[in-house]
Amino acid sequence: MIYLVTGGSGFIGSHLVEQLLKKGHSVINIDNFDDFYNYQIKIKNTLASIGKNSDFKFSDKDNDIRELVSISKSDNYILYYQDIRDKCGLEEIFKKHKIDLIIHLAALAGVRPSIERPLDYEEVNIRGTMNLWELCKDFNIKKFVCASSSSVYGNNEKIPFSETDNVDNPISPYAATKKCGEILGHVYHDLYKIDMIQLRFFTVYGSRQRPDLAIHKFTKLISENQEVPFYGDGTTSRDYTYIDDIIDGITKSISYLENNSDIYEIINLGESQVISLHEMLSTIENELGKSAIRKNLPMQPGDVLKTNADITKAKTLIGYKPDTNFQNGIKKFVEWFLRK
């Protein structure tokens, strides 16, 4: 099979690429190496995902990425330095390859930055995604897995969150763009018979996690004896999902699409274990053997109070079976952090 993965040099994407290659598939990776975080991290992710030596000599961004494209190309893997907002550039890629299925992970991520840059989020997360669907229509590609987010639930009062819950009240531009993606995805499914699964990820963590995300940020700050920003009273909580379980859910979604037709599904991928901010911080402290220097701050606009996934549908429909509890996941993450 030939899979196109957008955002294949990111946190989740690089793990997915690695898994697909191990299974003997061919992968086309489209990534624009956005400056949201250091492009060098994405280069290291890419090299790790394809099993290459990570001893890369960095110099200049454009030169570095050109070098990466050159050294990573193989019979079953090719990297394109490409922005999904550029439909003409995407079209040239689609012309060159016969694509069996698309896994769309590329996005501008983050709740707080979306409040500061809402129009950028609209361009990437809505228009960029529609560019891909338009090309699916034009090139007769009928299988599509799309990354949505638990943020679409907003401050949902019903616990745990179910795919049938009302999601008409997002509280950040990021969440709103992800809901738009779900709605527009249904339009393309209905009009053009594109089989599609929208995966609502619940707070993914693990090796290669973005450095701006809480677990990675807290681990780094504690290890360096720096202040840790602690928002709210510590009772906010998340359904943290370990990266291996997310990849399991994505690959099982791919298999489900390949073996079924006339599909449009929205599926939660979570761990179904709710962890408070207090517990998250203390778990990291225990693994590092160091106490955090807390800097207490007010809650931030756009942050939800709690997330908790009902994963009954994922278990029933695709055979999803998360098996990494939070304590073991943090242990694995800290081990990765200390040796990277």
Image (cartoon, helix red, strand yellow):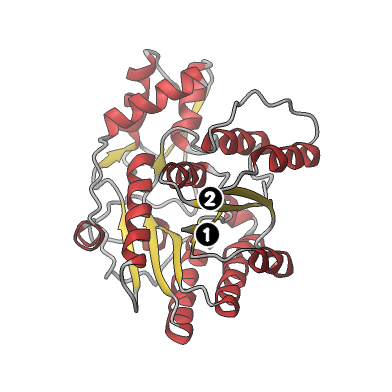
Q: Is residue 198 visible?
A: yes
Side of 172 where 134 appears, left or right: right
> In the image, what residue type sits under mark 1?
Tyr
Side of 32 where 301 appears, left or right: left
> In the image, what residue type sits under mark 2?
Gly
- Please name whichever residue, 117 or 258, is drawn nearer the observer in this view of the structure: 258
Residue 252, horizontal then vertical, whole percent? 32, 55
Q: Is residue 295 visible?
A: no
- Please name whichever residue, 205 or 30, is drawn nearer the observer in this view of the structure: 30
Residue 188, horizontal then vertical, whole percent? 48, 80
In the figure, 282 relative to 139: above or below? Answer: above
In the figure, 113 relative to 222: above or below? Answer: below
Q: Residue at x 64, y 36 (%)?
A: 43
Q: Residue furthest top?
A: 289
Question: Which is nearer the N-term, disc 1 or disc 2?
Answer: 2
Count of all numbered marks drawn on residues in the image: 2
- Please name whichever residue, 74 or 307, is drawn nearer the observer in this view of the structure: 74
Residue denoted by label 1:
174
Q: Residue at x 23, y 56 (%)?
A: 311
Mark 2 neighbour class, 10 Å CA radius: few under 14, some 14 to 19, many 20 or more: some
Q: Secondary structure at mark 2?
A: loop
In the figure, 139 relative to 33: above or below? Answer: below
Residue 108, horizontal then vertical, whole percent? 59, 54
Q: Residue at x 53, y 77 (%)?
A: 140
Q: Residue furthest bottom?
A: 191
Asked if the residues shown at circle 1 and circle 2 are in contact, with their CB atoms under 8 angstroms apart, the answer is yes
Residue denoted by label 2:
110
Q: Secondary structure at mark 1?
A: helix
Q: Residue at x 27, y 45 (%)?
A: 271
Mark 1 neighbour class, 10 Å CA radius: few under 14, some 14 to 19, many 20 or more: many
